[in-house]
Every structure is written in structure tokens, then in C-alpha cells.
Image (cartoon, helix red, strand yellow):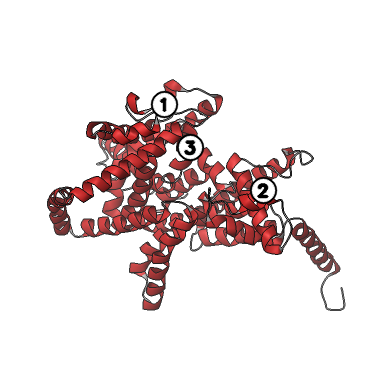
Amino acid sequence: MTGIGLPRTTVRATVAGGIALGLVYALSPLAVWFALAMWVVVAWAAHDLEGVERRWVIGLLVVAIAARVAAIGGLFAVTDHAAVPFGSFFGDEEYFIRRSMWLRNVALGIPIHRADLIYAFDEYSYSLYLYILAFLQVLVGPAPYGLHLFATALYFAGAVMLYRAVRDALGPATAYAGLVLLLFLPSLFAWSISALKEPLFFCLSALSIALAIRIPREPSWVRRAAAVLLIVAIPPALQTIREGGFAMTALGMLGGIAGAIVVRRPRIGFVALAAAPIVVLLIWAQPAVQVTAWNALKQVAKVHWGHINTSGFVYKLLDPRLNDERAAIDSLQRDEGLRYVLRAFAHYVAEPVPWNVQSRAALAYMPEQMVWYVLVACLPLGMVTALRRAPLTASLLAAYGLTAVAIVAVTSGNIGTLIRHRALALPYLIWLGVAGGAEIVVRLARWSRRRAGDGGRAERGVIQPEFT
């Protein structure tokens, strides 16, 4: 025993733990903060869960965190630091990390090359996220690998926010299955550990959805007001992170709320459905509206043209006469514009098509593409089922997901970029697809029981098997 009454083994273990923690913090401060953040996130995810369900959720999150830490550690291990200062998973990552370091050095008065100074403040790929990364490195020092951990923490925070919201609305089984896909689909896995702006964008978008779902249940007017202020502030913040972030989030929020109102008040829905075509025709009859809309369509078509003239594998949406010169898009005709839009949504769902695989990377992606096809097929039934059980949650998920689909579909043209940007919609559509799949299982089980003669006691709605 020591002088303060503690066993020597306890004191030695405490001292050794403190020394080890100090060494880890000296090597990577963000690793220590990441571990603390993940402890909080896992505890939050498992809050008020019991028994087997609690163990399954904690186990899933721990495995997902360990897999990402292993991937980031593997990147460090395989990088030849004698040749390059740090490794990266994607080319854009290297640019983001380098640029954030240049901004950090400028803030601290550390001299940098004149060319680096110019690129640090270049308008190309400007994002507030660069300044967030720079600020983190002002606090803890250069952290090219720690930034991956920071992005991972943001992604997990967003995933758990959606998990908790969906669990309350659609039940534990649907929420758990959606969380499995959200954490382990390969494209989302890669996205979650990237030092790019997507994890922060996803985290803030998920926060806006969670707040909107929470407001009607919140008894305190002060908290309601605070949640509303945060919801209003998030779209402008996302605009500084990604171009189009304001429109994507604002339209998703407004569309989700409007959809929930229509579902909960059928009379309003019938009136809205009857009035919508008339309102659209009246608005479209205005020449200024037609000109603005047509010019906007030409602009997104030019963005698509830029994508099909990049390296990699591409798919073309425009008629052949418009693919050679960007200026030819200015002569886009109405029938050509309609075909362009229809092709855009068809290719968004279909690409990369299995019978046209052109690389090993595309071949490796095929299993996830099959999952994507199944989710899309289950979406309509899942939407109906979810709207019946939780109109606000379902409407928000659908509105956020479909808004992202619309924005990405009409601008993409590079298959690799499409896969990356499709991840903007996947975190929301996953839950609805899973709900549809669960409903199919319920109906098949009911049909099977009826054939077996037990009267089909399967409960109507999304299947919710116990965690036993």
C-alpha cells in the first residue's frame, strides 16, 4: 500500500497509463481527441438500449471504428515518407491537406513559397472546410493523418444522429440494418475516412434532420427556438462548404416539412395535388421564368460536358451534335433538353452498368452496385411504409435524398465522380430502401404463414424482429 492508501499495482498502472497517454498525445493529439469523441458517440448511440440490442449496436460501432482506424494506420504504414510528406487515399485529399497546411503556416507567420501562398488563397475549390482543417492544425500542429480521424468522427456523429432518429420512427431492426449499410458500404466507408468536405457536409445535414424531427417532441420553447435557429443557420453554412449546399439543404428541409404536412392532412394533400399543375403552368407561362429555367438547364449541361471531357470512364447524356464543342450547348433545343434530363436520371440509377465494366475498380464495385439496385427497387414500397409510420422522418429523408439525386444527376458524366457524389444521397435513401425490404419480408412471411394455415399473424408494417 502507498501513503494515500492505494495499492502499488493501481498506482503503477495509473502512472503507466498516464505516460502512454502522454506519448500518444505527443505523437498525435487528434488521435486522443478522436478516441474520446468515439467513446461519447458510442455511448450516445447505445443510450437507453437494453440487452442484446445494446450489445449488437455497440459491437457494430466498435468494429466500424476499428476498421477505419486500421485503414488510416495502414495508409501511414505503406506510405514512403522519404519520398512524400504524407499519404492520401484520394488525389483531391492531398490538395486539401496541403492547402490547409499552407493556410496554417500563413496564420502562424511561417514563411512559405510564393507559389504556395497563391494557391492557398486560390478561388478554385474554395471551401470553409479548408479553414477548419487549418485551424485544427494551428491548435495541434501538422496532422495529415489526424485529419482523417477528424473526418471519421464527423461521419460517425452524423450516422448516429440518423440512426437514433430512424430508430424512434421505424423501429430498431430497420434502423440497425440501415446503420450496417451506412457504416460498411465500400463507397461510404471510403468517403467516411477521407479528409474531404463530404463528412462535415453529411454531419451538418444529418444534424438539421435530427433537429427538425426533434422540434415537435420538444416540450421546452427555448429549446425549440434554439433548434429552429440552428436549422436556419445550417444551409448558409453548408453553402460555404460546398457549392449548392444551401439549395440542397433548404429544398430538402422545406420539401420534407411540406411532405409531412400533406401526409398528415390528406385534404391539404388533395388540394395541393389538384392545384400543383395549375400553379406550374401559370408560372411557366411567364417568359422570364422560361428563359431563366432554360439558361439554368444549359449551365448544368455545360457542367456535364466538362465531366465527360475529363480523364477516366464517362457516360454521355447530350445528343451527339452537342458533345464535340461546349459552345454548341447554347443551341440546345427543347426536345434535346428533355432527352438530356431523362437520360440523366436513368444513368444516375444505372451507372456503372454491369455489362459495360471497363476497369478492375469498376468490377470491384459491382457488389455494391447490386446493393444499390436492390435499394432503388425497394424505395417506393419503403417510402409508403415509412410515411404511414412516421411522416415527418420519412418525408425529410426522402426530400434530402431526392434533392441530392436531382442536383447530381443532371451535372455528372464521369463514373468515378458519380459514385462519389451519389454518396450525398445514399445516407438518406438507405433507410427508406431498408424499410421497403423489411416490408417485403413481412409480406412474404405473412403469405407463408397463411399457406401454412396459421392465419398470418405477422404484424402489418415494417418488420421489427427482436434482438434475441
Residue 415 in picture, x, y percent from top left: 46, 32
Disc 3 designates what residue? 417
Residue 101 shown left or right of residue 402 in the figure? right
Placement of 131 over or under 421, stated as above or below: below
Crowd around label 3: few <14 · some 14–19 · many ≥20 (10 Å):
some
Disc 3 residue type? Thr
Q: Quarter of the image holding residue 389?
A: bottom left
Residue 242 in picture, x, y percent from top left: 47, 52
Crowd around label 1: few <14 · some 14–19 · many ≥20 (10 Å):
few
Residue 272 shown left or right of residue 16 in the figure? left
Q: Quarter of the image holding residue 349?
A: top left
Q: Which mark is residue 425?
A: none
Residue 205 in picture, x, y percent from top left: 44, 56
Q: CA distance from mark 2 to mark 3?
A: 28 Å
Assess whether mark 3 and mark 2 are in contact (beta carbons under 8 angstroms). Answer: no
Disc 2 residue type? Ala
N-terminal label among 3 and 1: 1
As helix, strand or loop, the secondary structure at mark 1 comes to: loop
Identify which residue, 156 or 456, lies in the foreground.
156
On the question of residue 187 being in view, the answer is yes
Disc 2 designates what residue? 115
Identify which residue, 440 or 192, lies in the foreground.
192
Disc 1 residue type? Val
As helix, strand or loop, the secondary structure at mark 3 comes to: helix
N-terminal label among 2 and 3: 2
Identify which residue, 286 or 317, lies in the foreground.
286
Quadrant in which the N terminus is drawn: bottom right
Disc 1 designates what residue? 353
